[in-house]
Amino acid sequence: MSKFDPHSHPSRRSSTQATASNAAPADSKTRREFLRSSSAVVAGGVLAGTLAAPRNVHAAGSDVIKVGLVGMGGRGTGAAANACDADANVKITALADLFQDQIDARLPGMAAQLKGQFEVPDGQAFAGFDAYQSLMQTDVDVVILATPPHFRPLHLRAAIDAGKHVFCEKPVAVDGPGVRHVYETVRMARDKDLSIVSGLCWRYDYGARETIQRIQEGAIGDIVAIQENYLTGLLSHRLRQPGWSEMEYQCRNWQYFTWASGDHIVEQHVHSLDKALWLMGDQVPESCVGLGGREVRTGEEFGNIFDHHAVYFEYPNGVKVFAFTRQMDGCLIDVEDYVLGTKGRAEILNFKIHGENAWQRDRKLKKPSMYLVEHEELMQGIRNGNHINNGDYMTGSTLMAIMGREACYTGKTITQEAMLNSQTDLSPTPYEFGEIPVPEVPVPGVTTLT
């Protein structure tokens, strides 16, 4: 079984193309135009030679690492706090969010919590669709990207173009064009020696690392099948307010719209699918089949996402990954990864192996928060010059999740090749507050992937 190489994959050479030195302004170019113009440099094989030298890269061994936060929701502000806890000489010096009221609400609490590590001067808290561009022009060394997933390809490219190291929340795209674009940006970051640390946090959990290492060393024999469960409850919802346009309403309730979140199989279940990818040597499955729908969240306030998905993914060697995700109250809650092998079985989050090589991680062993470790390793890598790039697996896990969603939406078999070559672009047009269409709920057997 050959390892998937995103850098040489033919579908990447036929994807999209942009200048390597400029992120597309949100107010002058739609995302479709941006993604459509993104890969000639790669296709020509001259990427490394045409990239400008990194700017604003933190010098190894210097004291203060300046961090900018793009996306001031709970995950973003949490990640900013984790970065400060990870390194006493980290300072938050710039902020960006789509909404000014979000900045106004969050800024005082961040200042109080982070104290001397929060030094955002007047004029460095930016709001609007182009706020990320303004932040990239500041002297921050590291950018935390924590907006809704739809915007990740644009924001990640802008950060790498600006010579910033990145902490990149999951997932990193919501459709095929976005995935292709991120793969290219990841290569740019590697060529410019810039860090990309992923928010797929279980990769930074000591217990999960030890359990998966034992499996990969043969503790359960050959892997036969993997079952990934992310069965949980309902999400919160923001009521429509007077004066909100349809675009504002959808952005404030982004979890419920596929264009913004990717649906919960992509936005949430990607954590589970990433562990399957990890177990399988970071290879993306060959194909998948799925079923799903809306059983509980049927009202128009819940956008156009499903509330349950069930997918099985197939690898060329016959290994299958069975993935189940559901957001419903009153049902079984189970978030665990079950791995079946020829000599035993394992539970990843329980740090446990059954069979002839039975093992359980000592529960008395203390381990730091994985949310802290990912930032510790990011900052340590920046300081010692050993920069981390998690880009390939974070993009592969996102691709796997999008494959699963499209299998459920269409009712068809979705192959890796078809998904990576897909021209289905979920972008709203344009990026401004106004009246945009309300997306239709997908119908298996009717909905198609182009």
Image (cartoon, rainbow, N blue to C red):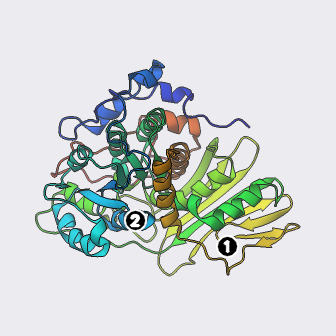
Tag 2–tag 1 contact (CB < 8 Å) = no
Which label sits in the foreground, 2 or 1?
2
Q: Is residue 162 above or below residue 75?
A: above
Task: Give how far across and how far down residue 124 sits, in percent.
Answer: 18, 55
- The residue nearer to you, when weighing 131 against 411, is 131
Q: CA distance from mark 2 to mark 1?
A: 32 Å
Residue type at the position of mark 2: Ala
Secondary structure under tag 1 reads loop
Task: Give how far across and how far down residue 250 sits, in percent.
Answer: 26, 58
Numbered tag placed on residue 338 in the rendering: none
Residue 90 showing in the rendered view: yes
> Residue visible at 63% across and 51% down?
277
- Circle 2 Cα neighbour tier, 10 Å, few/some/many (<14 / 14–19 / ≥20): few
Residue named by callout 2: 88
Residue type at the position of mark 1: Asn
Residue extending furthest toward the left:
243
- The residue nearer to you, when weighing 67 against 19, is 67
> Residue visible at 27% across and 45% down?
136
Residue named by callout 1: 350
Q: Is residue 232 above or below residue 445?
A: below
- Circle 1 Cα neighbour tier, 10 Å, few/some/many (<14 / 14–19 / ≥20): some
